Image: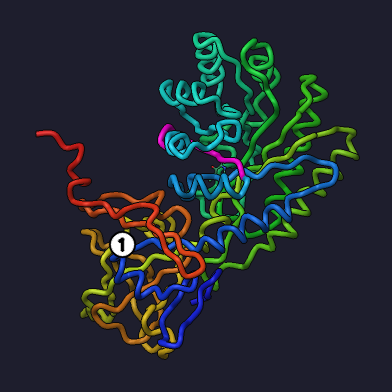
């Protein structure tokens, strides 16, 4: 297993994160357990701050909270000076409860409800990212009713097939997100916002997909979008003030992933915008990005306790862990590949090939399809790396499993930021 962030191996041969023995973490807080390496989150944020800077263009980094959000995470993001992208009433409510400054919140979603929009308008979010024509009408209507004004970006679809899993491509021509840049009524759509007394259109947003590991897709996105910005200036007389380039920066999960050079990617994206702007005599005063996964994925590790092991008649060796697809649906959903290790046997030789399966009543409840590990025994602690993004946030109560606790670790200290669910939490909303 690749050691990420502050991971190290101590003299007992155990995995440490944030200078804490993970075997002790498992003992203290129970398993399954999501462990977050706070120093690594801060380092990842800093890499974005260093890389996404340009002498001539204002820049802003917005954390895409769908990757992982809790009140504690909101506080960390605020402390690190980033803005927040929320995509539902629940994410917005979490931010509100954390007193996250509303003027740093961007509200997304392809089907925001009236209730969610009212919540966003009442909280005074910085911007609403409009996805479709119905939403233009709806936001205008609600602003009129509430006698309120709001700044908006229009989400557009540049029609790009990013090199990633089809479920996380978001900008091919049949994507459900945004309005196509090739829509023949695009000038009318823009006017329906700019003509509104209550809405100020600051510019456009696009996002080509997630877990993208080649810079080429990002640069292609910029070329297509800058062309659009130019066309809109000429044909619709609309000058873009802000362009939100979305997130999607890919991370290392396994040896199969070629690593994205983030610093070079960010620098090249900025220079591409600058170069095309100059060539075409257009000015975009402000650029924004929305990374989620790249800030938290490699900062999260899930600890499980090993229960049974089983050799099947067909020749497969299973390790059964006390969690599975309920706390990490990504393997079942996207064929995601994870690395892992036995946290109490880090210096033992990897001799046995295993499949790591969870405890849900589904054959598809697999955490890692194939992994070579030291011989596993009951009560070993299995660590699965890079589970910080889209694990806790996508967790379910399937089979009425309780969602695990989330612990932040840093400099030898640990703190619970989300308590483990109890059986009472499981039945809390049941009525007779
Ligand atoms: C609009 C938008 N912005 C940002 C993100 C964050 O993407 P990632 O976590 O890959 O950086 C997503 C996720 O797909 C998204 O849909």
Picture quarter with the C terminus: top left
Q: Is residue 429 magenta?
A: no
Is the residue 21 above or below the residue 358 in the image?
Answer: below
**Which of 190/121 is in front?**
121
Q: Mark 1: is the Cβ under 8 angstroms from ligand 1? A: no
Task: Tell me what residue is drawn at x 43 percent, y 34 percent.
Answer: 93
x%, y% of residue 95? 47, 38
Q: Which quadrant of the view contains residue 319?
A: bottom left
x%, y% of residue 327? 34, 57
x%, y% of residue 354? 34, 78
Task: Tell me what residue is drawn at x 63 percent, y 32 percent.
Answer: 156
Camera sees residue 183: yes
Instruction: Tell me which segment is drawn in magenta.
Output: 82-90
Task: Tell me what residue is drawn at x 30 percent, y 83 percent.
Answer: 376
- 335 vs 306, left or right, is right
Residue that carries the numbered disc 1 in the rendered image? 324
Q: Dot 1: few (<14), some (14–19), or many (≥20) neighbours within 10 Å?
A: many
Task: Tell me what residue is drawn at x 26 percent, y 50 percent.
Answer: 397
């Amino acid at each position: 297993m690749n050691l990420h962030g502050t991971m190290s191996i101590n003299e007992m041969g155990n995995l440490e994160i944030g200078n804490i023995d993970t075997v002790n973490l498992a003992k203290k807080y129970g398993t399954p357990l999501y462990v977050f390496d706070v120093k690594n989150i801060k380092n990842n944020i800093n890499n974005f701050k260093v890389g996404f800077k340009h002498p001539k263009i204002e820049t802003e980094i917005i954390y895409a909270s769908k990757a992982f959000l809790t009140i504690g995470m909101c506080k960390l993001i605020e402390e690190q000076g980033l803005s927040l992208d929320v995509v539902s009433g629940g994410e917005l409510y979490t931010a509100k409860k954390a007193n996250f400054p509303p003027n740093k919140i961007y509200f997304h979603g392809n089907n925001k409800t009236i209730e969610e929009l009212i919540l966003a308008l009442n909280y005074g979010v910085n911007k609403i990212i409009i996805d479709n024509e119905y939403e233009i009408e709806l936001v205008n209507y609600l602003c009129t009713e509430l006698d309120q004004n709001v700044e908006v970006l229009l989400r557009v679809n540049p029609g790009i097939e990013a090199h990633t899993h089809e479920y996380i491509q978001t900008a091919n021509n049949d994507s459900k997100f945004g309005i196509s840049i090739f829509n023949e009524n695009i000038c009318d759509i823009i006017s329906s916002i700019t003509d509104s007394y209550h809405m100020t259109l600051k510019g456009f947003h696009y996002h080509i997909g997630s877990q993208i590991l080649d810079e080429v897709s990002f640069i292609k996105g910029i070329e297509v979008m800058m062309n659009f910005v130019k066309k809109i200036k000429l044909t619709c007389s609309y000058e873009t003030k802000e362009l939100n380039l979305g997130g999607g920066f890919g991370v290392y999960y396994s040896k199969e992933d070629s690593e994205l050079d983030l610093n070079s990617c960010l620098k090249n994206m900025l220079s591409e915008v600058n170069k095309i702007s100059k060539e075409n005599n257009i000015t975009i005063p402000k650029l924004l990005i929305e990374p989620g996964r790249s800030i938290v994925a490699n900062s999260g590790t899930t600890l499980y306790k090993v229960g049974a092991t089983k050799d099947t008649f067909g020749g497969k060796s299973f390790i059964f862990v006390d969690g599975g697809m309920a706390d990490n649906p990504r393997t079942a959903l996207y064929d995601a590949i994870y690395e892992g290790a036995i946290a109490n046997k880090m210096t033992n030789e990897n001799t046995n090939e295993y499949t790591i399966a969870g405890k849900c009543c589904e054959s598809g409840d697999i955490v890692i399809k194939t992994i070579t590990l030291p011989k596993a025994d009951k009560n070993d602690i299995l660590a699965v790396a890079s589970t910080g993004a889209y694990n806790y946030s996508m967790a379910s109560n399937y089979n009425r499993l309780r969602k695990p606790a989330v612990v932040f670790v840093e400099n030898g200290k640990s703190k619970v930021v989300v308590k483990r669910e109890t059986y009472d939490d499981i039945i809390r909303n049941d009525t007779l």
